[in-house]
Image (spheres, helix red, strand yellow):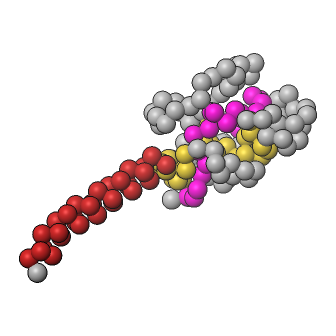
Amino acid sequence: MARRGRRAPAVVAGSLAAVAGAAWLVRRRYVAITVVGTSMSPTLLPGSRVLIRRGTGALRRGRIAVIAPPDPDPATAWRGREPVGRDLDAVSWNIKRVVAVAGDPMPSRVAGGAGRVPAGHVVVIGDYPLSHDSKQYGPCPEGQILGVMVRRL
């Protein structure tokens, strides 16, 4: 019985390390954000909280993505930018709906809307009619996407 008692602290310490490791992985993979602005109204209103899964693995038509804002000049938009990092405070993120992915026909309302969506790009449009998105700036490079919305909180 004494032998069993000596192993218990090691088991507890191992379990705590496993839980801490799992929490660290979840925090690296998922992030909760608060919606600011009306570009996704009425789907997401200002103050809505959503859970985002970092990365582009779940990127499909109809999904909501968190993207880096384009340059205000439509001629430059997202062109020539380095891929976004994981720092949530680095930029003021935008949230938009993915309406076309690489290889899909380019929607006619998109800036430069002819042909197909280029490889490594998506077309993003806010649900609010006056949203600033691919309509003005063209397709968004996947490297400018922080992640994809998993659910509302």
111 to 51, vertically: above or below: above
Left-right relation of 136 to 39: right
99 to 132, vertically: above or below: below
Position in image of residue 148 (x %, y %): 61, 48
Position in image of residue 14 (x %, y %): 26, 61
Front residue (pair 115, 50): 115
At a point 48% along the width and 29% down the height, the residue shown is 90
Position in image of residue 36 (x %, y %): 55, 42
| Number of residue marks | 0
Tell me where the magenta segment starts and ends, as one range.
Answer: 128-152
Q: Quadrant of the N terminus?
A: bottom left
Q: Residue furthest front?
A: 3
4 to 13, vertically: above or below: below
Position in image of residue 76 (x %, y %): 71, 19
Query: Can residue 135 be seen here?
Result: no
Query: Can residue 8 be seen here?
Result: yes
Front residue (pair 49, 12): 12
Is residue 143 located in the magenta-colored stretch of the structure?
yes
Q: Residue furthest left?
A: 2
41 to 18, vertically: above or below: above
